[in-house]
Image: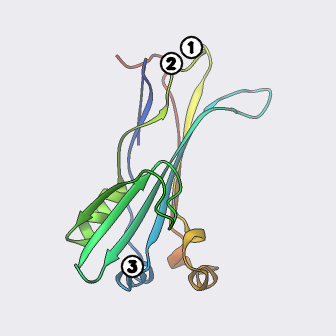
């Protein structure tokens, strides 16, 4: 994970390494889409109270397999992806499962804060979380996912921001 800070805001780049569990890959091949969520939050550290959230961002990804064309499709959006078709998403198709998983794992220069941080004397940190969102799967899969480690795919990391902005 790398965090970059300049006058335009705070940018996050990260590589999340994981292998798709066999149950998840089997569900994908059968045509059931999987939803991944990447969340980042910039917090101001305070010794006298809870840390104060300054900015937050989320990126939603929908990974699906098209059996008729034998292609993998990845949709990315700043809002939750629903089945209604409303909203703005970026869609890409891939030939191989390894290519699409590599695209899910890679986050490059993601803007998590629109403005520069207000107080240069304060200490800030970035909390990053990446997970498989089982709440958006069909109900039978949600019930079977409870308590099974193959469906638990999540990672988190926290990093302190440097006091000087990058130039």
Residue at 47% in and 62% down:
36
Q: CA distance from mark 2 to mark 3?
A: 44 Å
Q: Of discs 2 and 3, which sits in the foreground?
A: 3
Instruction: Give me the residue at 54% from left, 65% from top.
Output: 133
Question: Which residue position holds label 3?
Answer: 28
Near-viewer residue (35 or 152): 35
Are the two marked residues, 3 and 1, in contact with CB atoms closer than 8 angstroms?
no
Q: Secondary structure at mark 1?
A: loop
Tell me what residue is drawn at x 61 percent, y 15 percent. 119
Instruction: Give percent across and percent down for residue 100.
Output: 29, 64
In primary-sequence order, the first of circles 3 and 1 is 3
Labels 2 & 1 near each other (Cβ < 8 A): yes
Image coordinates of residue 86 in percent, x first then y, are 48, 57
Which of label 2 and label 1 is nearer to you? 1
For marks 3 and 1, give the CA distance. Answer: 46 Å
State the image coordinates of residue 34 (x, y, percent, origin top left): 45, 71
Task: Check disc 1 and report the residue beneath it.
Answer: 120
On screen, residue 70 above or below 39: below
- Check disc 2 and report the residue beneath it: 163
């Amino acid at each position: 994970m790398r965090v970059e800070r300049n006058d335009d805001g705070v940018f996050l780049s990260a590589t999340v390494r994981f292998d798709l569990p066999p149950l998840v890959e089997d569900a994908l091949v059968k045509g059931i889409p999987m939803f991944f969520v990447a969340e980042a939050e910039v917090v101001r550290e305070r010794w006298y109270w809870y840390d104060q959230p300054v900015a937050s961002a989320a990126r939603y990804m929908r990974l699906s397999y098209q059996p008729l064309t034998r292609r993998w499709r990845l949709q990315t959006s700043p809002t939750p992806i629903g089945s209604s078709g409303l909203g703005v998403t970026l869609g890409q198709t891939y030939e191989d499962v390894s290519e699409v998983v590599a695209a899910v794992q890679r986050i490059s220069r993601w803007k998590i804060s629109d403005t520069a941080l207000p107080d240069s004397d304060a200490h800030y940190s970035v909390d990053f979380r990446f997970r498989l969102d089982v709440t958006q799967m069909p109900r039978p899969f949600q019930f079977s996912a409870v308590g099974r480690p193959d469906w638990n795919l999540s990672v988190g990391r926290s990093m302190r921001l440097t006091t000087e902005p990058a130039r």
